Image (cartoon, rainbow, N blue to C red):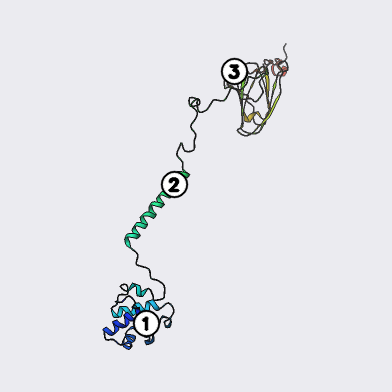
Amino acid sequence: MREDETVGQILHDARVAKALSREILAVELKLPLRHIEAIESDDWEALPPGRSRPLARQLAERLGVDLEFHTGAFHTVPGVQELAPPDPRQERLERLVMGLLTAASILVALWLVVPGPSLGRKPLPSYLTALPRSMPPPPPPPSTSPYPVLGELLPEAPLNDQGALISLRSLDTCDVRLEPLPEVGGPVQVRTLRVSEPWRLRVKGPFILRLDNAGVVNVEVAGVRIPHGQNVGEVWVGSFDAEGRWLRPVLPPPVAADPQPPDEEEYGTPP
């Protein structure tokens, strides 16, 4: 093979060596005779656009010519350069590299989205490490008023130095009025209880409790339930001393009825 040989000359020599005519090849390959003549004369412009390389390869396969062996000559044929078949080992290596890159990207994303317990947290100074994590809230300042504010939630002891604990729980709407006695003094508390709405407060000193719908309210004073005995819609007023004891009204004793004289008609007139 000469270095200056073209594809057309190589195919022409192969056809002559096999003693084949152009007409026979045209019939066998079902190609126009002018295409075979154009290939052997390297007249690539006479062939359809983009068909130069496929037609040359088809004719070479029929004549038993390996155009890969004539790489230099085949590169002169116009047309798109055909890519070499992929290497399986190269493909496996590329897939392995892509898999490693994907796994690394997922790990980086997880590290950024779900940081560790100490990520982004600055260590505490040495003089703060011994302190507790949370400090308890400071106690409330003591009240300066001689009487506690009505409605204020205080410790649950039934009776202490701040007064008697009053607990009211209503099953329906009820107006409540709590009034300290005049000799004690203090604000009057008025409130409307709703369904299942508790009201707990402390009162220091004697007081009067009034319920406009007593039958729906459970009353407990200084830890003792008050059985007022009123029905729904009835008004009840109760007085209590400084220790929360219910001062029940003292009922007067019943007055005996005067005896009726015997009926004279029934027993007759005495002689």
Q: Residues within 10 Å of mark 1 (few under 14, many from 20)?
A: many
Q: Which residue is mark 2?
A: 108
Which label was assigned to residue 159?
Answer: 3
Which quadrant does the C terminus fall into?
Answer: top right
Mark 1 or mark 2, which has the lower sequence index? 1
Image coords of residue 84 (percent x, y): 35, 67
Q: Residue at x 34, y 72 (%)?
A: 71
Image coords of residue 163 (percent x, y): 63, 18
Mark 3 or mark 1, which has the lower sequence index? 1
Based on the displayed image, in which of its 4 quarters is residue 57 positioned?
Answer: bottom left
Q: Looking at the picture, which amino acid does disc 1 mark?
A: Ile
The reply to whether residue 70 is visible in this rendering is yes
Vertical relation: 73 (above or below) 164: below
Q: Secondary structure at mark 2?
A: helix
Q: Which residue is mark 1?
A: 39
Furthest residue toward top: 271
Furthest residue toward left: 18
